[in-house]
Amino acid sequence: MKLGRINHVGVATPSIDQSIAAYRDLMGATVIGVPFDLPAQGVRVCFVDTPNTQIELIEPLGADSPIVKFLEKNPQGGQHHVCFEVPDIDAARAWFDDKGARILGPTRTGAHGTPIFFLHPKDMGGVLTEIMESPGDEH
Amino acid sequence: MKLGRINHVGVATPSIDQSIAAYRDLMGATVIGVPFDLPAQGVRVCFVDTPNTQIELIEPLGADSPIVKFLEKNPQGGQHHVCFEVPDIDAARAWFDDKGARILGPTRTGAHGTPIFFLHPKDMGGVLTEIMESPGDEH
């Protein structure tokens, strides 16, 4: 496997609206997606485009959201994960299995509509790492 | 100001050597810089290239390193900051001053040899945010 592009940097926030305001008004972001719910992951999502990658803002969706604990520890929000693209999610999963990396849960559909899974931070120097099949139109 | 490209995602690590091994052997990174000391920032640095941006591995350099506390809280390491490029560091500093954002310390020379400063995480949803003048050759 070859290291792919960083699709996005995942940033947890207690308020997508406030985070949008910061990226728009303070940082000058001009391409900001419409926030949407991703119930399968328990988060509300908004993508902020940079010229070369994206910030993925994630806000808890429901009390069982997997990012509730993160926000208890980091009430203002913070960097939550980094997402790398792979050409084939099944091949990537087999690769990481073969390497003995800990994969968190099943392969599922991510915020860009392509299959994803997460690697345990303990195998990646404390960084929660998302592996995402590239959207076809980026090839 | 317009949101610039993400130059790098800063990842603190107790061991650059171990992190290099993870990015190389597990993630398939092939373009990995030679680690170097950046005494002015109190860190040892190594850049790992992805196709569209970089991971900046930072390891404490000396007991007074500004990332010692971060590693006490996150012994395995973790995402430390995100760095955005700007065309002109002085204009960017004036912009953030004008917006009332808290700038951490003076403008100084960063790991890529161009001037940088940091914004307080409290103004950026908990994300320590580095602002870096683009290297000339990327224009």
Image (cartoon, coloured by chain):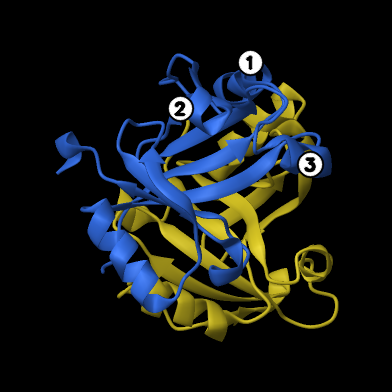
Chain colours: A yellow, B blue
- Please name the amino acid that badge 3 sits on: Asn
Which residue bears the numbered disc 3? Answer: B74
Total numbered badges shown on the rendered structure = 3
Name which residue lies at 85% across and 76% down: A64
Subunit under mark 1: B
| Gap between marks 3 and 1 measured at Cα | 17 Å
Which residue bears the numbered disc 2? Answer: B47
Name which residue lies at 40% across and 74% down: A26
The quadrant in which the C terminus of chain B is found is top left
Q: Residue B97: image x %, image y %? A: 38, 69
Name which residue lies at 47% across and 76% down: A22
Is A11 positioned to the left or the right of A67 in the image? left
Tag 2 and tag 1 share a subunit: yes
Q: Secondary structure at mark 2?
A: strand
Image: A52 above or below A48: above
B128 and A30: which one is in front?
B128
Subunit under mark 3: B
Q: Which mark is residue A97?
A: none
Q: Tell me whether circle 2 and circle 1 mark residues in contact (CB < 8 Å).
A: no
Q: Residue A89: image x %, image y %? A: 56, 44
A22 and A85: which one is in front?
A22
Q: Tell me whether circle 3 and circle 1 mark residues in contact (CB < 8 Å).
A: no
Q: Residue B107: image x %, image y %? A: 38, 47
Give the foreground label among 3 and 1: 3
Name which residue lies at 45% across and 20% down: B32
- Please name the amino acid that badge 1 sits on: Asp
- Please name the amino acid that badge 2 sits on: Phe
For the residue carrying disc 1, how many other residues have a C-alpha within 10 Å: few (<14), some (14-19), or many (20+)? few
Which residue bears the numbered disc 1? Answer: B17
Q: Secondary structure at mark 3?
A: loop
